[in-house]
Image: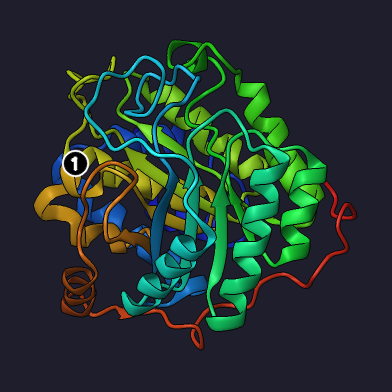
């Protein structure tokens, strides 16, 4: 069907839900019409975020040795990938990682652990780490620790954590094809626990895992319905030794169309061009800045990525600006733990 860009932009900016057939039409656009989608997505993006680009840094706080069977992950129980494996880093190491993130120009520092979920000792350590970082740096703190209870999320909030990442990853329909050791509903419940604790939600997914366009749309509509505060869109980086090592379904243009759909459906949420951006977008990476207002720098959990200096140059070359703490948009008012509505 022909795409009415003016209508899509106006509906998006007014908070109305884009019709599914129109969102599907964006995904099915011929590549020569890609720039029409990018221009429309930028019209939506600039109202909330202007030309600001938030840099985020990941810290792999515990690597490998995970009992979960996520097919895409080099750290899962199914993986034979050659990666570093180590227990939870010491507090000093994680605080030092925050210092490096600040030096890289990051506004957000996200500490990630492998595993099904954190122990009480893990939670206590991340609370200690967060307090130490907050005493030294003006950084947004995000953690990604697996399945969380509301009580655990409350402790993190009280220590100064602002965001918790827990991706839905794909559609409810397709989820059993990528993981059997926990369910889509387990992930939804963790997001609800995070929100109920008054934390900001960071949840998106991974595309390129063999899902259909309908699955991509299901995910995009799900994160809209759950009103995610921050939405990372990851593009599968096939890693040797994982069940998805041979998957090669994405093109740079397809990745950009997917980002546009997520922006139209989530006009006020942070949208991050996340893992696999460099591998899948290749020379078209700079165009991701039209729909997305955030990127990761300095690599991912077990794979390399664009370094901060190169990212800053890319952003400046495109006429955008690197967001600093003083440019960061205001976050929601503090909420007493356990009082935020799901």
Q: How is the protein colored in the picture?
A: rainbow
- Residue 254 screen position, x and y as percent: 24, 38
Q: How many marks?
A: 1
- Residue 173 screen position, x and y as percent: 53, 14
Tell me the quarter of the picture where residue 310 sits.
bottom left
Residue 317 sits above or below residue 195 on the image = below
How would you rate the neighbour count of disc 1 (Cα within 10 Å): few for under 14, some for 14-19, many for 20 or more?
Answer: many
Position of residue 38 in the picture relative to residue 211 (left or right): left
Tell me the quarter of the picture where residue 53 sits.
bottom left
Q: Quadrant of the C terminus?
A: top right
Q: Quadrant of the N terminus?
A: top left
Spot the residue most to the left.
Answer: 283
User: Going 62% across and 49% down the picture, which residue do you hit?
Assistant: 228
Position of residue 160 in the picture relative to residue 144 (left or right): right
Residue 291 sits above or below residue 80 on the image = below
Residue bearing the label numbered 1: 280
- Residue 172 screen position, x and y as percent: 57, 20
User: Going 85% across and 50% down the picture, which residue do you hit?
Assistant: 341
Q: Quick one: 225 or 117, which is closer to the camera?
A: 117
Spot the residue most to the bottom.
Answer: 326
Position of residue 280 in the picture relative to residue 205 (left or right): left
Q: Is residue 264 visible?
A: no
- Residue 238 screen position, x and y as percent: 22, 28
Residue 208 sits above or below residue 34 on the image = above
Q: Is residue 272 visible?
A: yes
User: Could you say whether the residue bearing mark 1 is in a helix, strand or loop?
Assistant: helix
């Amino acid at each position: 069907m022909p795409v009415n860009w003016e209508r899509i932009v106006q509906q998006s900016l007014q908070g109305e839900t884009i019709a599914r057939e129109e969102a599907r039409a964006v995904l099915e656009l011929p590549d020569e019409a890609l720039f029409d989608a990018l221009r429309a997505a930028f019209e939506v993006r600039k109202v909330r975020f202007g030309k600001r680009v938030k840099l985020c840094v990941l810290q792999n706080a515990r690597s490998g040795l995970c009992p979960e069977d996520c097919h895409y992950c080099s750290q899962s129980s199914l993986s034979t990938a050659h990666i570093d494996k180590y227990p939870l880093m010491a507090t000093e190491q994680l605080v030092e990682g925050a210092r490096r993130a600040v030096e890289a120009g990051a506004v957000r520092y996200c500490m990630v652990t492998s595993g099904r979920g954190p122990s009480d000792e893990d939670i206590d350590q991340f609370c200690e780490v967060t307090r130490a970082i907050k005493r030294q740096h003006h950084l947004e703190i995000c953690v990604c620790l697996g399945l969380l209870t509301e009580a655990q999320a409350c402790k993190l909030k009280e220590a100064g954590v602002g965001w918790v990442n827990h991706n839905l990853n794909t559609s409810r329909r397709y989820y059993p094809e990528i993981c059997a050791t926990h369910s889509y509903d387990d992930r939804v419940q963790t997001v609800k626990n995070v929100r109920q604790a008054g934390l900001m939600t960071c949840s998106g997914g991974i595309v390129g895992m063999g899902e259909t366009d309908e699955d991509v749309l299901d995910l995009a509509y799900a994160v809209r319905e759950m009103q995610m505060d921050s939405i990372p869109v990851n593009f599968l980086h096939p890693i040797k030794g994982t069940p998805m090592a041979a998957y090669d379904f994405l093109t740079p243009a397809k990745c950009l169309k997917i980002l546009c759909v997520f922006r139209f459906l989530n006009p006020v949420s942070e949208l991050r061009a996340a893992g696999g951006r460099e591998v899948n977008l290749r020379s078209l990476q700079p165009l991701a800045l039209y729909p997305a207002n955030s990127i990761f720098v300095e690599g991912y959990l077990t794979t390399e990525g664009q370094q901060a200096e190169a990212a800053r140059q890319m952003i400046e070359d495109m006429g955008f600006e690197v967001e600093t703490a003083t440019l960061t948009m205001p976050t929601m008012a503090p909420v007493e733990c356990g009082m935020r509505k799901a």
